[in-house]
Amino acid sequence: LVQQPRTAVVGEVIGGTCEVRVGPVCIKMVMTHPVLVELVDDLGNRVITGRWFVCAIPVLDGEAFPDASVLEGATKVDTVLGLASFNDLALRQINAAWQLNFTVHNADFATTCDDPYLDQIQSVVFVITFNTADGLLI
């Protein structure tokens, strides 16, 4: 993983920064730190040839989360010059022990995230929290 997932607000893009918030709702999100997965060979060289895709799977407390729909956005991303950039992932459940598991697939032999994969890597633990709705007048 070139760039790990970061703490985010429930329902908002992981790695994004909210530029305009109205109460608890972000109305303008800008991607500042997308989750990046790099495809490398056994020598650590970036693999820029071939057709590859990477899948993201939500993990909670070390186990694949049973309801994959809790992870929104493009969970299957093609690599471009050996990098898969996850620009719109969001989790719909608050927790302090989320991880993402990434699987690498050869597109010449696989078409979906359920197909056999060649390798996998798991992210660091990150937090999905609630928004404090600062700035609200009561």
Image (cartoon, grey):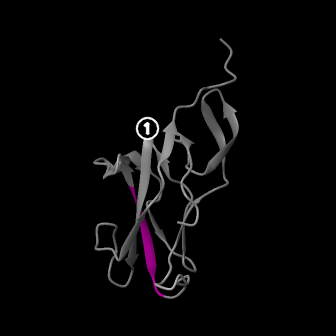
* Residue 132 sits above or below residue 45 on the image: above
Q: x, y (%) of residue 83?
A: 55, 73
Residue 15 visible? The answer is yes
Q: How many marks?
A: 1
Q: x, y (%) of residue 19?
A: 71, 42
SS type, badge 1: strand
Q: x, y (%) of residue 23?
A: 64, 26
Extreme residue toward the top, this view? 138
* Quarter assignment of residue 95: top left
| Observer-nearest of 74 and 50 | 50
| Residue located 37% across and 74% down the image | 119
Asked whether 56 falls inside the magenta stretch, the response is yes
Asked whether 99 falls inside the magenta stretch, the response is no
Q: x, y (%) of residue 81?
A: 58, 80
Residue assigned mark 1: 95
* Quarter assignment of residue 76: bottom left
Left or right of 66 in this view: 124: right
* Residue 131 sits above or below residue 2 on the image: above
Chain part drawn in magenta: 50-57
Extreme residue toward the front, this view? 43
| Residue located 51% across and 35% down the image | 129
Which image quadrant: the C terminus?
top right
Extreme residue toward the bottom, this view? 49
Left or right of 122 in this view: 21: right
* Quarter assignment of residue 75: bottom left
Residue 10 visible? The answer is no
- Label 1 packing within 10 angstroms: few (<14), some (14-19), many (20+): some
Left or right of 89 in this view: 106: left
What secondary structure is the magenta-colored segment mainly? strand
The residue under label 1 is which amino acid type? Asn
* Residue 78 sits above or below residue 34 on the image: below
